[in-house]
Image: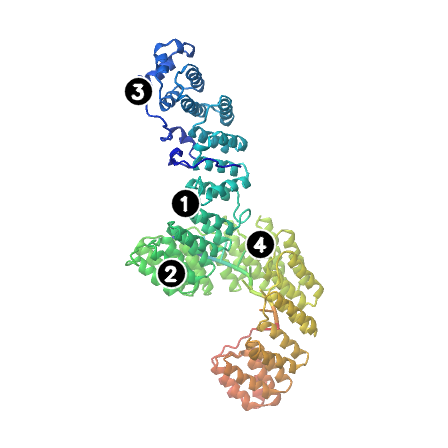
Amino acid sequence: MKLAAARKSILHLPALPKTGRISGLRHFSGEIDDTQKPLPPPPTSFAVPEIVSLLKTTDHNDWISNSQLVEFLHTPPSPTSLLKITRQLGSTEKALHFFEFFKTHSSSSSSNLSSLSFTFQAILEQAMHEEKSDVPGKLFQLFSFAKDRKIPLSINAVTLLMRCFGRAKMLEESISVYNELDSDSRNTNVVNLLLDCLFRGRNIDDGFKVLDEMLKRDSDFPPNNSTVDIVLDAMWKRNWVGRRMSVEEICGLLVRFFEHGVFLDDVWFTKLITKFCRSGKCDKAWDLLHDMMKLGGQVKASSFNALLSGLGREHDFQKMNLLMNEMKEKEVNPDIVTFGIFINHLCKCYRVDEARQVFEKMGGSETDGVLVKPDLVLYNTLIDGLCKVGKQEEGLKLMEKMRLENGYVPNTITYNCLIDGFCKAGEIERSLELFDQMKKDRVVPNVITMNTLLRGMCKLGRVNSAMRFFAEMQEKGLKGDVITYTVLITSFCSVNNIDRAMSLFNEMSENRCLPDAKVYYSLIMGLCQARRTDDASYIGSKAKEAGVGLDIICYNALIGALCRKNKIDEAHKMLKDMEEAGIKPDCYTYNTLISYFSEKGQFTTASRIMKRMIDDGFLPNVVTYGALIHAYCLAGNLDEAMKIFQNMSSAINVPPNTVIYNILIDTLCKSDKVEAAISLLGEMKDKGVRPNTKTYNALFKGLHERNWVEKAFEIMDQMTENACNPDYITMEVLTPWLSDIGETEKLRSFVEGYEVSTSTA
DNA sequence: GTAGGGTTAG
């Protein structure tokens, strides 16, 4: 498409209309391009209203016999007078008659074309308002009429036609209108219309060619704000972001606009920044924001906020701070949302005290010259932050404070935060009290309230209470959602009641509640733990059928369960399945497989997998080496196990942790090398690796074999010093041994102060 | 800008 062969003639380019937006069609007839006055006003010997009245009251066949009208024809009227007159004739038909009358009888030749095009413009305007249906069709008829008679189109007529055709997606027609306009009269606004028509008509490639011309450094039609609007509108509505255009391409394009001094308004800019951040391109959003500032654009608080919240989601606290400092430098005042993001972020990092300081500062005195009064959202954020660090009592106090000092009535979110706080602290009764208080406050509980309470009950093992509560709430009209079912299913699985879990799973689908990856995970894990690996795989395939993609965690759990069940072929199939679903193995997957093969004594296979792991960018970690050490110990190759262990701290710089020491200490004790085991315990102390109950249990067993009482006492004292709880295994070893040798007193004082865990963990 | 579920490997 040839855009502009025209010389750039500023004089002939009309000024940009103030309402350059495409959506302004209805207001169009009021718009007159004032620069459309190529001629000085002629001496008027007639008045527009008079002529209009004459034309309206006289039949058009009699116009030529009216002396006043004939005189009017001989005193060339200005094009704008003609425009005014034609507009007032009341119908397209009359306007067309007038057009013919003027064209046929007017004596003026110099102004003829210009006058005709103004008259014609008024006809178009009339037609647009008069026509009830098929405006584009009628306008196209008129356009063809003008074209046939070689009447040049005024810039306003072109605008009107192109807008109309563009909206009607009449791309061909729009382009021919554009081509009718003589190149000297083309301007950015007309090119904008062309661009809009091309995008609406889905001729994207030509659209981009036009845009590219506009964006060139010495462009004849430099872009304006409408150009940006047209491009963004097309991009947004037709979902180009991330599909047709990458974030990078969009940024590149926008920077070209910036270089022309054309910037985005804060609504668009905020929308884009948000979109970029949500698609994981915070860095690009960051660059774009800075490019716009660098090139002179004004960035408002809302756009900063969008980026801040994106950075917050990525936990990039450093950049959040940087950005907030830049806001200060650029004198962009933070608003309530800025504070909201900041305080929420501090809370999510468990830095509640700092959050509270900011909160109090902003409410009380001025913070850096900015005074923003905290609102309910901010209170809720802080209350939640307090609850999340176990300060639910303080949260409760804050709720009362906000009520008394600010008159804010707590809402469902306020209550949900507090109820969750007390639930997580195991104080379900307090949560239920708050639930009752909601009624008094006329705050309506929602599904989140219910789920929070259900989970609180389940965590305490009160699955039946939970089921009763769920039934009550359902009677009151509250429906469970996928989270409700996940909580209940997880809970039934944890008490090994797979049947109830399964029936809830089925009930969920009946209640038109779609299972998601998490609920599948819960059920699959439950089945794996119940050793029903086949059922677990079956549910996995059901998930696939339902179009629910299992995530990496779920696949890893399944692969692990299959390995534990010695079903390596099925595990392999699952792995293939996972890779086909586009999920790459991660270090958990690799470690699971390495652990399986090394425990089977297939060290060659294990090391082949380890190589692939490294090729995939996952460095073997402490778990990988743990698996190998464990396997060599099982295979009776303690030397190889020790070699790996020594390499860990020296060569590969993966310091051994408690689990590694435990494996070795246990094996050493079982191989009658208690001295070496004790020396490893000493090494743990030196290296700051904390022994746990398992460490001590392994040692006690070894010492018992040797009947090495003194050493056992020493280690019992150490255990007490380290505040490490004995468990039932500790007691199983120590009780008979020490009783037999009459050291019950020592045993009593050792156990004192401990509530011996009965867990089999 | 605020609230609820599952977190797999030695």
Determine whether the residue tagged by mark 1 lies in a helix, strand or loop: loop
Q: Chain of mark 3?
A: A
Query: How far apart in space, not on screen, are marks 1 and 4 (Cα)?
Result: 45 Å
3 or 2: tag closer to the N-terminus: 3
Determine whether the residue tagged by mark 3 lies in a helix, strand or loop: loop
Query: How far apart in space, not on screen, are marks 3 and 2 (Cα)?
Result: 83 Å
Q: Chain of mark 2?
A: A
Query: Are the numbered discs 3 and 1 placed on the same chain, yes or no?
Result: yes
**Can you give x and y, in whole percent of width and height, for residue A359 in the image?**
34, 59
* Residue located at (65% from left, 52% from top): A545
Label 3, on which residue?
A43
Q: Chain of mark 1?
A: A
Is A41 on the left or on the right of A667, as rendered? left
Q: Disc 1 or disc 4, which is closer to the eye?
A: 1
Q: Disc 3 or disc 2, which is closer to the eye?
A: 3
Please determine whether, in this image, residue A538 is positioned above or below residue A233.
below
Foreground of the two, A742 or A1: A1
Foreground of the two, A96 or A575: A96
